[in-house]
Image: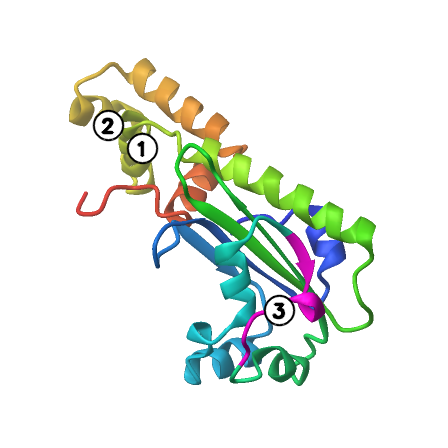
């Protein structure tokens, strides 16, 4: 499971929704840590196409309180969210000048509105997570192949025959994958790469 930065956990006690590298209608990856009851209600009522927070995030760079978002809300998404404990929130959004992919985060709390300093923290945390995810995405196909074989239970010696390289080269690729993923063990690296959908389909 992806680890949320400690500052985001502290600033979003009611929940977090993260989207990394959104292009067109599809993100490279999203993580929804909002209350399950809200997720169910949101999904069943197809609120994503009416959500003013998502509309704002798609169009803007920066950070803003939910109460300050000036986008149409015909289905009352923000007021409905309050019924599920999401009474105050913020949304931060940024676009990568290289990939043109957009990342954004929505944070929520039930006790009070966000201060200006907290908004700055949320924006900084999004930038750090975006940069980390960009680095994770730089795992090479060779490293991914070695890691995927490991995840399938193939030992390094057997993997070397599959890949046509030495056993030490397999171990070097696994070490490089761990480093790029920021994982202390190969098993954790495989778990994270799977969660982030970094392996090619059909392998």
Give the numbered dot on residue 159.
2
The residue lying at 35 percent from left, 59 percent from top is 25
The residue that mark 3 highlights is 70
The quadrant in which the C terminus is found is top left
x then y, percent, for residue 42: 49, 79
The residue lying at 27 percent from left, 36 percent from top is 149
Dot placed on the residue nearer the N-terminal end, 3 or 2: 3
Circle 2 sits in a helix, a strand or a loop, which is it? helix
Q: Nearer the viewer, mark 3 or mark 2?
A: 3
C-alpha span from label 3 to label 1: 43 Å
x then y, percent, for residue 23: 37, 50
Magenta segment: does it hold 66? yes
- Is 106 situated above or below 143? below
C-alpha span from label 1 to label 2: 12 Å
Whether residue 185 is visible: no
Circle 3 sits in a helix, a strand or a loop, which is it? loop
x then y, percent, for residue 92: 62, 53
Whether residue 140 is visible: yes
Circle 1 sits in a helix, a strand or a loop, which is it? helix
The residue that mark 1 highlights is 144
């Amino acid at each position: 499971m992806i680890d949320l930065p400690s500052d985001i956990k502290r600033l979003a006690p009611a929940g977090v929704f993260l989207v990394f590298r959104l292009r067109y209608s599809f993100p490279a990856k999203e993580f929804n840590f909002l209350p399950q009851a809200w997720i169910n209600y949101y999904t069943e009522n197809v609120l994503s196409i009416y959500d003013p927070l998502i509309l704002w995030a798609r169009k803007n760079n920066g950070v803003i309180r939910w109460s300050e978002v000036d986008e149409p809300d015909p289905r009352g998404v923000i007021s409905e969210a309050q019924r599920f404990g999401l009474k105050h929130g913020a949304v931060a959004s940024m676009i990568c000048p290289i990939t043109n992919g957009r990342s954004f985060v929505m944070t929520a709390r039930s006790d009070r509105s966000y201060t200006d300093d907290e908004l700055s923290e949320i924006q900084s945390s999004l930038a750090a997570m975006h940069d980390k995810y960009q680095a994770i995405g730089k795992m090479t196909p060779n490293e991914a192949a070695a890691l995927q074989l490991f995840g399938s239970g193939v030992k390094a010696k057997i993997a070397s025959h599959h890949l046509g390289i030495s056993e030490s080269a397999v171990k070097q690729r696994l070490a490089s994958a761990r480093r790029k993923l920021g994982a202390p063990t190969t098993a954790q690296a495989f778990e994270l790469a799977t969660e982030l959908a970094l392996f090619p389909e059909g392998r």
